Image: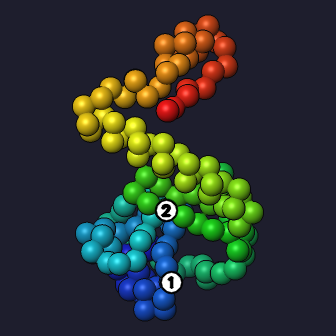
């Protein structure tokens, strides 16, 4: 069971963050630490030490394969695992999405309608209702 003690040791060793394929405990204390911790849920019980852990080995977390060298990126919305090649491929698209969303948010915060920035919104809804492929366009 991952909790305050293991998190403190991880932080002491300079580990950047932890992703736990299971539950954590000591949640209020973990939230106060500078070490980001992502887990499947919370549970108050202490764990057992019946298995020795391993590092730098391929693992499966749910349906996601994680290999040594993969990038594991997380925030309050969740965790993404990708190779360096995938990161280089996706990063420009992610940055582009951030710029578009920032412009749209500024427009809405200034009193404009979100849908003014999605010129094909009605056509998209109609296409989806008919089972046709469609993508929203954003200005």
Residue at 48% from the left image edge and 42% from the top image edge: 100
Q: Is residue 139 left or right of residue 93?
A: left
For residue 33, which quarter of the picture? Answer: bottom left
Q: Is residue 73 left or right of residue 31?
A: right
Near mark 2 (Cα within 10 A), the count class, few <14, some 14-19 or many ≥20, is: some
SS under mark 2: strand
Residue 16 horizontal/vertical position (percent): 49, 79
For residue 66, which quarter of the picture? Answer: bottom right
Q: Which residue is more in the foreground, 59 or 81?
A: 81
Q: Is residue 130 left or right of residue 25?
A: right
Residue at 64% from the left image edge and 12% from the top image edge: 131
| First of labels 2, 1 by sequence position | 1
Q: Look at the image and tell me whether residue 126 can be seen.
A: yes
Q: Which part of the image, by quadrant, shows the N terminus?
A: bottom left
Q: Which residue is more in the foreground, 119 or 38?
A: 119
Residue 128 horizontal/vertical position (percent): 58, 15
Tell me if residue 25 comes above or below residue 114 in the rendering.
Answer: below
Q: Which residue is more in the foreground, 52 or 82?
A: 82
Query: How far apart are the two marked residues, 2 and 1, measured between alpha carbons?
Result: 14 Å
Q: Is residue 3 left or right of residue 90?
A: left
SS under mark 1: loop
Q: How is the image coloured?
A: rainbow
Q: Look at the image and tell me whether residue 62 can be seen.
A: no
Q: Which mark is residue 15?
A: 1
Total numbered labels: 2
Residue 20 horizontal/vertical position (percent): 51, 67
Tell me if residue 35 comes above or below residue 61 in the rendering.
Answer: below
Q: Which mark is residue 74?
A: 2
Residue 22 horizontal/vertical position (percent): 49, 62
For residue 116, which quarter of the picture? Answer: top left
């Amino acid at each position: 069971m991952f909790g305050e003690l293991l998190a403190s040791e991880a932080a002491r060793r300079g580990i950047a963050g932890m992703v736990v394929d299971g539950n954590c405990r000591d949640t209020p204390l973990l939230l106060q630490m500078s070490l980001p911790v992502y887990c499947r849920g919370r549970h108050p019980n202490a764990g057992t030490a019946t298995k020795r852990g391993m590092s730098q080995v391929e693992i499966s977390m749910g349906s996601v394969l994680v290999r040594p060298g993969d990038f594991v990126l997380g925030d309050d919305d969740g965790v993404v695992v990708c190779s360096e090649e995938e990161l280089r491929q996706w990063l420009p698209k992610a940055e582009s999405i951030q710029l578009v969303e920032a412009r749209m948010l500024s427009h809405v915060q200034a009193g404009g309608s979100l849908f003014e920035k999605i010129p094909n919104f009605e056509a998209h809804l109609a296409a989806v209702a008919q089972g046709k492929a469609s993508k929203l366009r954003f200005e």
